[in-house]
Image (cartoon, rainbow, N blue to C red):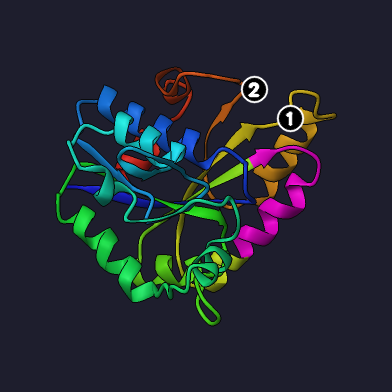
């Protein structure tokens, strides 16, 4: 039986990719085959092989199935701006249907454990009418919520969880990822979020600049997902 999840965050730069890689590493440690996709990425470097995104490259390096880059990140934009703005600047139109097709192509590889990583937060626009939340809804996958532990995280975590719930998707669990090493009252914030979110905390990842996904994966309770 395979397990697949949509990874989203409370904001941009909260460590979605690092957590997604940690999940993949934890799954591989259990002997599971893994695959991942970041269907849309803005903030890419243009090299000999074309546009490449660091987050997508990290996912590609961590998963066990040998998928080509174009399947891991089918839509890439060079400027690090909102995807729908980047698309408009290039005269392109992105649709959720197209993104769904890319994601289902990866899921058809039937890895034991797969993750689909969003961009930014839950309601990042794809075009004038659709958001990445619509992608998650079409795929109908359980969600893993990455909470960037910094000032304001309680409000961001609760609001994002409420939005996901209103969209009718289950939240399989959340990860506390410390993105501010100097955050005041970390423990108190963490306990407040644990009390307010009615789904399991999969683990805490401390401030790990340049950290290894395997080390972070060892801090996550992957069993709570595999049994979902």
- Residue 208 versus residue 167 in the image, above or below: above
Task: Give the mark nearest the N terminus, 2 or 1.
Answer: 1
| Residues in magenta, as a range | 148-162
- Side of 202 relative to 139 (left or right): right
Frontmost residue, 52 versus 167: 52
Q: Where is residue 88 shown, x and y percent of the image?
A: 53, 72
The residue sitting at 60% across, 67% down in the picture is 163
Q: Residues within 10 Å of mark 1 (few under 14, many from 20)?
A: some
User: Which residue ends up furthest to the bottom in the rendered image?
Assistant: 129
Q: Which residue is mark 2?
A: 207
- Residue 137 versus residue 31 in the image, above or below: below
Q: Residues within 10 Å of mark 2 (few under 14, many from 20)?
A: some
Q: Which residue is mark 1?
A: 180
Frontmost residue, 153 versus 180: 180
Separation (CA) of disc 2 from disc 1: 7 Å
The residue sitting at 52% across, 47% down in the picture is 43
Q: Where is residue 11 shown, x and y percent of the image?
A: 64, 51
Frontmost residue, 70 versus 191: 70
The residue sitting at 73% across, 45% down in the picture is 153
Q: Are marks 2 and 1 in contact (CB under 8 Å)?
A: yes
Q: Main secondary structure of the magenta part?
A: helix
User: Which residue ends up furthest to the right in the rendered image?
Assistant: 184
Q: Where is residue 67 shown, x and y percent of the image?
A: 19, 42
Secondary structure of the residue carrying numbered label 1: loop
Q: Which numbered disc covers residue 219?
A: none
User: Is 98 contained in the magenta span?
Assistant: no
User: Which residue ends up furthest to the front in the rendered image?
Assistant: 48
């Amino acid at each position: 039986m395979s397990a697949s999840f949509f990874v989203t965050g409370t904001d941009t730069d909260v460590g979605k990719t690092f957590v997604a890689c940690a999940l993949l590493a934890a799954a591989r440690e259990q002997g599971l085959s893994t695959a991942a996709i970041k269907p849309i990425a803005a903030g890419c470097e243009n090299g000999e092989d074309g546009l490449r995104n660091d987050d997508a490259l990290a996912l590609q390096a961590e998963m066990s199935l040998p998928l080509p880059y174009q399947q891991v990140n089918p839509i890439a934009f060079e400027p690090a701006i909102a995807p729908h703005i980047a698309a408009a600047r290039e005269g392109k139109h992105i649709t959720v249907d197209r993104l769904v097709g890319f994601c289902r192509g990866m899921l058809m590889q039937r890895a034991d454990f797969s993750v689909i990583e969003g961009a930014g937060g839950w309601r990042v626009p794809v075009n004038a009418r659709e958001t990445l939340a619509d992608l998650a809804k079409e795929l109908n996958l359980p969600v893993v919520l990455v909470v960037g532990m910094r000032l304001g995280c309680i409000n961001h975590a609760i609001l994002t969880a409420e939005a996901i719930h209103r969209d009718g998707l289950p939240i399989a669990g959340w990860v506390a990822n410390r993105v501010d090493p100097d955050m005041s009252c970390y423990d108190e914030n963490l306990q407040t979020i644990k009390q307010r979110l009615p789904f399991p905390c999969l683990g805490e990842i401390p401030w790990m600049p340049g950290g290894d996904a395997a080390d972070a994966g060892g801090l996550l309770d992957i069993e709570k997902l595999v049994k979902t």
